[in-house]
Amino acid sequence: MSTLLALAAALLFAIGTWLILQRALTRVVIGIGLLSHGANILMMSSHRRGTPPIHGNDDPGNFSDPLPQAFALTAIVISFGVTAFLLALAYRSWVLTHDDEVQDDLEDRLIGRGAWVDKDIADEQAAIAEEELEQS
Amino acid sequence: MTALLSLPIVLPILGAAGSILAGRVKYAQRAISITVLSVNVVLAGLLLVRVDDVGVASVQAGGWAAPMGITLVADRFSALMLFVATVMLLAVLIYAIGQPGAERHHVGFQSVYLVLAAGVSASFLTGDLFNLFVAFEMMLTASYVLMTLGGTPAQVRSGMTYVVISLIASALFVTALALVYAATGTVNLADLSGKMADLPEGVRTAFSVLLLVVFGIKAALFPLFFWLPDAYPTAPGPVTAVFAGLLTKVGVYAIIRTQTLLFPPESQAGTLILIVAALTMTVGVLGAIAQNDVKRILSFHIISQIGYMMMGLGLFTVAGLAGAVFYIVHHIVVKTAMFLVGGLIEHIAGSGRLSRVGGLVRSAPAVALLYLVPALSLAGVPPLSGFVSKLSLVRAGAAADAYWIVGVSAAVSVLTLYSMMKIWNGVFWSPAEEPPEGVPHVVGRIGGPLLMIVPTAVLAAAAVALGLFAAPLWEFSERAAADLLHPAAYIEQVLGR
């Protein structure tokens, strides 16, 4: 059972990492979700298994440890909230650029054009803005 | 006692709720925020005095004894951090209220800002690893919103990077928590301190490095810093100032807290941390030299400065840690002041590009002075606070025979001075440029709205005061560092034995 859980966690981590390295924002968002699922499964498998705690007259020594479940629950709620925010951000990005791809940084693009001589930056900025306007 | 430890977290949350209820009544919102943060400053001050006089203070939330319950605990280091952080939050809030612009008129700004304050307080006061995670999330979620509040393309683009990087760090944090809990059966820091010692050395080293990576992403250590210079400059001026002054420093706090409390100093890979420190400060300052925008130069400097704090930790001596504690205080004050000046420059000139701005020494001499004081302090020119903090780190390094890191830190200081002068030449001394359209040419007698100038001036004055009257803070830092290296009192107070 715990081998299965460990495998599931490993798989989720692997797929999540791969998705986060993509350029499309939707994939990044899904990747983040998978990654936190992997972490939560790892959290769930980090405790002693047993009978349900508190419920019933079982010996407390046989209870399963409820603390990691509480941890995982908290972590799930947090990642749920932040994923919702991330989706809103991705939507905003789509509204602004009509594109799902992560944009290159402006400074990176300037350096890529060899335009690091400061005098030219204003012109380059204008040129890039124009290009973007044409594309959209 | 209970009130002193819990109110700095509870009050801002209540204030945030009240601020939402106050809705669009701007003056009520401002009154709530300023009241809450002022009370927090007083509480943090009282806590600081109390902890220094009596010793470590702790509260078990809900009355459940540690390690079962949720522990809030303050020792000298965390009380000092809390005090400096709350003062900073109050100063920046006043600045934000004074700054004209779209962001501050956003109805959510004040409440999100208070949630950020609660998250910062909780990070400093919590006594267990899981609540540190929750506090971090509280702070970070608030910071995501503050960073992207304007909704401009640049903010969305860099906000995305920032959120994704932070989320990866959080997932790693949960992973670390799961593994630590599986190995030890506890997340209480004081309890962990004892139980970590029983683990095999290899497992302990793995935990140590894992936690270093998790907090290293938040603190922007080399090689985990790439997100910072992209993300910070796009946020509105006051927001960047808070992020620059506080958020990375909460990461540094977590690194120092976990590395000293959980892992015994004699088993520490101090040299590794020193190498990371040297690379962080060098790469940061070289990045700063290459930039042409005020906020981007300052953002790269944050990275460089984190290296100095890590240098103090990596030495694992009382003198080194005392230097790190002093450095963090100096850095929070000075860095926030510099970003506030950066905001003033953008306010006056309409841009932060060195090529687009000029002649501010004539048109806004007060701002020039406000820039010069923290800039020289950051570079370590006597008698300002940067000089004292760098001197203490250099002396600690020399005492520990780590001369190479002393050499690196001295060289980086010179480069820091160079890049500070680059801003000075570009913004203040160069011939005046025609400001872009829509920016008022006349800036008034003092160079900006009073509410923006006064907090900046107070912080700049604090940088001078910390240098001229360094002795009390230095002695306090030494006591705090001694506590960090010998955490017996901390553990005893939390576990009650």
Image (cartoon, coloured by chain):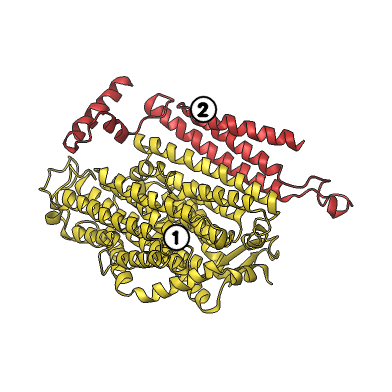
Chain colours: A red, B yellow
Q: Residues within 10 Å of mark 2 (few under 14, many from 20)?
A: some
Residue A92 visible? The answer is yes
Classify mark 2: helix, strand or loop. helix
Q: Residue at x 20, y 61 (%)?
A: B369
Pick out the residue farthest to the bottom. B53
Q: Residue at x 48, y 49 (%)?
A: B216
**Residue assigned mark 2:** A27
Q: Is the C terminus of chain B in the top left, top right, bottom left or bottom right quadrant? A: bottom right
**Rendering quarter of residue B478:** bottom left
Q: Amino acid at mark 1?
A: Ile
Q: Residue at x 68, y 32 (%)?
A: A8
Q: Nearer the viewer, mark 2 or mark 1?
A: 2
Q: Amino acid at mark 2?
A: Arg
Please give left or right for residue B250 compared with residue A56 in the image: left
Q: Which mark is residue B32?
A: 1
- Foreground: B34 or B382? B382
